[in-house]
Image (tube, rainbow, N blue to C red):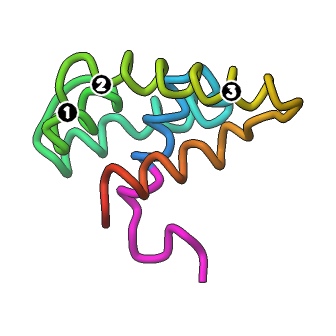
Amino acid sequence: MDRYDGKPFLRLLDCYVLQAIGKLDTAQMVALTQIEPKLSQIYGVKGPWQEIVANQMDFPANLSDEIEQTWEAGRLRAADQGLEVDPGEFARQFVDANFPH
């Protein structure tokens, strides 16, 4: 089963985390920007997709900064051990741990 089957908002959460750590790829960013009008219509909130997600989840204003700090701390710990952290895996784990679906 695909992670996002029946859970389209979950993909938005993963992308939100990737954006916060500066790892959302350009193609995905373009696609999300293109669907902003549809997201606005669905959720009744105007603005960029990140603001729509934040509004729906009632995120605090500094959450992106907190996500980035968590990413950097984990990345540095991994680097000290000669390892690299996969941004996509980090996003999935962060979402699963902090926003149970």
- In percent of width and height, residue 78 lies at 74, 31
Discs 2, 1 touching: Cβ within 8 Å: yes
Which circle marks residue 17 in the picture? none
Q: Which residues lie in the magenta part?
A: 1-11
Relative horizontal placement of residue 26, taking residue 18 as reference (left or right): right
Q: Identify the residue under disc 1.
A: 59
Which circle marks residue 77 in the picture? 3
- In percent of width and height, residue 55 lies at 16, 35
Relative horizontal placement of residue 46, taking residue 50 as reference (left or right): left
Give the amino acid at mark 1: Phe
Q: Identify the residue under disc 2.
A: 63
Marks 2 and 3, how far apart at CA? 21 Å
Q: Nearer the viewer, residue 36 or 57?
A: 57
**Considering the numbered disc 2 on the image, is that residue within a helix, a strand or a loop?**
helix
The image shows residue 61, relative to residue 43, as above or below, that is above
Q: Residue at x 48, y 27 (%)?
A: 70
Quarter of the picture containing the C terminus is bottom left
- In percent of width and height, residue 34 lies at 47, 34
